[in-house]
């Protein structure tokens, strides 16, 4: 974000000012949502850490000590990044009153847009190799699946393939 502290750089056209204000509001909303998700993640990790600390004196306490240390490091990193995001949000809120230059860089949305619904769809499921009783296959139960959506190009056509691999 390239912010200018000077009010003289602001455009005089009301439509441009409205556009700049709406861009700033959108940025502040996005940063607020990101802060909220990071806060939820921190709370979740703190709860996991509390559970690990309670079970610390069990049979496998050495493994738990390592897990506790890793969680503490992860929480520290997340809190540092959250502080940076809050500082950016404060700067964005201040720039709302001061203004910003019209040559502001636009952020790209993260991730890929979903494939269109009009494409022919194919579902591919990769089953485990052996689930027979002699291999102990009856003991296993499905706990989830790794799923992905792939665009497959065949000359003159495109297909949407949904690939699922059970865990």
Image (cartoon, rainbow, N blue to C red):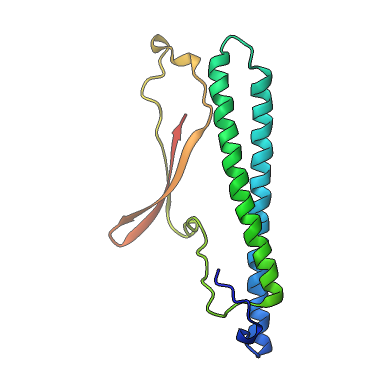
Q: Nearer the viewer, residue 67 or 147?
A: 67
Q: Does residue 105 sit above or below 71 in this rendering?
A: below
Where 130 falls versus 147 (above or below)? above
Q: Is residue 99 left or right of residue 164?
A: right
Q: How many marks?
A: 0
> Hey, which residue is sitting farthest bottom in the picture?
12
Above or below: residue 137 compared with residue 19 = above
- Residue 79 drawn at (x, y percent): 63, 44
Let me know if residue 30 appears in the view: no
Q: Which of the 4 image quarters holds residue 165?
A: top left
Q: Residue at x 64, y 58 (%)?
A: 87
Is residue 116 at least partly visible in the picture? yes
Query: In percent of the image, x 52 and y 26: which residue is there?
Result: 142
- The front one of 78 and 161 is 78
- Image quadrant holding the N terminus, namely bottom right
Quadrant hosting residue 45: top right
Could you say which quadrant of the image residue 6 lies in? bottom right
Viewer-side residue, 62 vs 105: 62
- Horizontal side of 16 relative to 144 (left or right) equals right
- Choose between 22 and 57: the one closer to the eye: 57
Q: Residue at x 68, y 45 (%)?
A: 39
Q: Residue at x 57, y 20 (%)?
A: 64
Farthest-out residue, left: 155
Residue 101, above or below 157: below
Image coordinates for residue 161, horizontal then vertical, percent:
41, 48
* Residue 154 pos. (x, y %): 30, 56
Q: Residue furthest right?
A: 97
């Amino acid at each position: 974000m390239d912010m200018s502290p000077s009010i003289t750089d602001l455009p005089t056209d009301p439509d441009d000012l409205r556009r700049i204000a709406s861009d700033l509001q959108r940025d502040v909303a996005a940063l607020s949502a990101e802060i909220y998700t990071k806060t939820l993640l921190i709370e979740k990790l703190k709860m996991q850490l509390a559970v690990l600390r309670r079970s610390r004196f069990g049979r496998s306490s050495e493994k738990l000590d390592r897990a506790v240390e890793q969680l503490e490091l992860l929480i520290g990193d997340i809190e540092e990044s959250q502080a940076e995001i809050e500082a950016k949000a404060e700067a964005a809120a201040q720039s709302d009153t001061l203004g910003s230059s019209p040559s502001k860089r636009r952020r790209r949305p993260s991730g890929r847009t979903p494939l269109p619904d009009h494409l022919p769809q194919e579902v591919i499921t990769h089953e485990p190799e052996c689930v027979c009783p002699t291999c102990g296959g009856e003991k296993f139960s499905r706990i989830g699946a790794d799923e992905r959506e792939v665009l497959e190009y065949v000359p003159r056509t495109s297909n949407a393939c949904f690939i699922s691999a059970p865990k």
